[in-house]
Amino acid sequence: MPELMGDDAGQAYFDAVIARDSRVEPTDWMPPEYRHALIRQMSQHAHSEIIGMQPEANWITRAPSLKRKAILMAKVQDEAGHGLYLYSATETLGITRDAMMAQLLAGKARYSSIFNYPAVTWADMGAIGWMVDGAAITNQVPLCRASYGPYARAMVRICKEESFHQRQGFEILLELSHGTPAQKAMAQDAVNRWYGPSLMMFGPPDADSPNSSQSMAWNIKRFGNDELRSRFVGMLVEQARVLELELPDPDVRLNPETGKWEHGPLDWAEFKDVLAGRGPCNAQRMERRRAAHDGGAWVREAAAAYAAKQAARAGKEAA
Amino acid sequence: MTTPQKHRNPTPFAQGDSAASATRITPGNALRPEDIALAAAEGTAHPAPEVAEYALRLGDDALVLAQRLGQWISRGPELEEDVALGNIGLDQLGHARSFLSYAGAAWGKTEDDLAYFRRESEFRSAHLFEQPNGDFAATMARQFIAASWQYPLYRELSSSSDPMLAAIAAKAVKEVDYHLDHSTQWLLRLAGGTDESRRRMAAGLDLMWPFVGELFEDDPLTAQLGDAAVVPSSLKAEFDRTTGAVLAEAGLAVPAHPMATGGGRRGRHSEHLGYLLAEMQVLAREFPGASW
Amino acid sequence: MCPAENSAAAPADGPTDAPVSRDSGTTPAPAAGAPGWPLWEVFVRSNRGLSHVHAGSLHAPDATMALRNARDLYTRRNEGVSIWVVPSDAIAASDPDAKGSFFESPQGKDYRHATYYTKSEGVKHL
């Protein structure tokens, strides 16, 4: 309702929408903090999709079978698509994609830290699909009900499309695990390396996550970081059994009192380091994105110039 | 040849317009490489040796091009273009898998045996497809030439006397039709955009044009195949017309370079193919016999 | 993967995702980037006999490329048999202020619906 009727009326209307768990739409009045929080979270999500293409693109040309090559190409392409859906949804909040891209390239916007780890073996394609996409999906499914309409709608499309991402990763690991001893060792090594970082994708423990409670009050987030992490660990335990691979965590257990899955200590110091830019691939990932963006500038300019010329010609003919 | 497995799309009409959705997804219904591999394994697809040789050529062209397009992903000039190049690469990879699966049926080999365990001299790709991506204009020049050749080729091949070649081509021609449109649109925009883009587009065409000649060379195999194959030289006039019209609209001259000596069909390749294969084959060869 | 909202959230709500052309009072006025390709809204017809439905948006230099980008982005899984693209800024939307009054009139006019006519209940073919 009334964005022009003053902030009080607007706030009351917004509060009522949130209270009855309805959806906020782009033209509605919304508190500036809500808008800011959405822009931050959604653009970060979009950047993660785009930067997240890189570790997997690294293996497209070396995929060990043509079937796997096709699957991986389709998956990385999906990630470009998902970045696009999310950038578009964020644009409805009044920020342009160019501005978001500029923030990313200037180091002012974040993306998921997980993509600052290197994908060094083929088994990493399996571990990324199974664990990284698995964690992402655990996070994203509740976002299909996020209070901001365009975000929720983008997530519905993304979740539908991503349903194959985790499965193909699982299958890669299953093939390796049932392959030669060297293949199985490759799979186990990848699981060992991606386990901790994938658990940390849910963000710091709720106690150290200042934005979490506000985000939940606004119905953007539906569950706390620890709750989602616990659910994810539970799924991993069962699936690892099918894979016949070990999770590198002797402390994983189902707490019979709470009914929740628990895990061993995570290396939050490393998490902060990677977040602060000291991960193995931070510079490399940014450089690649910058090279693509800057290297493509002449193409974008050419297409815009051509469109302008065509429009001018059409105008002249009409006149 | 087996009938491809059918995927039945649910018919939405009964539900009226309430079924309208922008996210309803289906796998579609088309000849898939897996269907051909299955037919080969069951012994129902058995190409004559010379048909297999011919399928190998077309398969290698498509495979090498798909590998090149795979190098673009995450490096496109705009995200929308990353998605477009991904689609085109996946189409080419699909054609490659179909042709190679069929060719392999003649020798008891799978698509992967052929892709990963042949030596460079055993590949049959033409030099055009092996050319490095260069900048976006060079890639579009290569795509434009490739599609201007593949489109009439597959259209004619879809009435091949060999039913499997005809079926693969019938699927491929619709996809390549879009590749031709995509590269044509970009050629016009780059040629008619800025001074820089025009210079780059002309340079890209100069770079790729010498490899046009090889595509249209007849040889004993194509002569021997009769109605099963398309005589390469028979496509040249249409290629000249198609490309000539687009270049004229773009205000660019048809490059007047002498044609390069080819040899890809006899296993004589450009300097570039070795690197491409080394990268493509490295993992598969590290684990021979492994399943992935 | 999103069982909760698969059907409910199908974006059948038209171009309401179009960016706010008018800066609403609370927009933090982000730093503008270099002007890029314009934004287009994409509508997809999933099958013959059905309406075009808003699928999302994308950037493209002109309508010709917008259609192609839409084909590549929004119909990778057989989602469509026809596509419309519309420049986002060409869409006129109803005034968000008017939610209350603009759509008030049909409320309470039960006699427009078959369920209002209870006396004919149980009569066949009516």
Image (tube, rainbow, N blue to C red):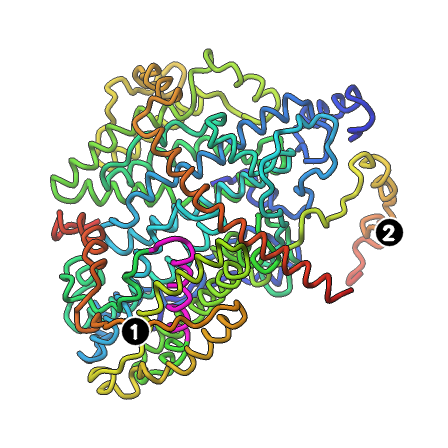
Q: Is residue B168 above or below residue C95?
A: below
- Camera-nearest residue between B164 and B73: B73
Q: Main secondary structure of the magenta part?
A: helix
Part of the protein shown in magenta: B133-151
**For mark 1, does the 10 Å Cα neighbourhood hold few (<14), some (14 to 19), or many (20 or more) residues?**
few
- Camera-nearest residue between A315 and A167: A315
**For mark 2, does the 10 Å Cα neighbourhood hold few (<14), some (14 to 19), or many (20 or more) residues?**
few
- Camera-nearest residue between C58 and B103: C58
User: Is any part of residue A274 visible from this angle?
Assistant: yes
Which of discs 1 and 2 lies nearer the camera? The answer is: 1
- For badge 2, the amino acid type reads Lys
Q: Is residue B95 above or below residue C98?
A: below
Question: Is B279 within the magenta?
Answer: no
User: Is any part of residue B19 visible from this angle?
Assistant: no
Q: Quadrant of residue B110?
A: bottom left
Q: Is residue C110 left or right of residue C62?
A: right
Residue denoted by label 1: B259
Quarter of the picture containing the C terminus of chain C is bottom right
Question: Is B148 within the magenta?
Answer: yes
Q: Residue at x 39, y 27 (%)?
A: A113
Q: Quadrant of residue B274?
A: bottom left
Disc assigned to residue C119: 2
Q: Position of residue A289 (x, y in %)?
A: 41, 38
Q: Position of residue A192 (x, y in %)?
A: 24, 28
- For badge 1, the amino acid type reads Met
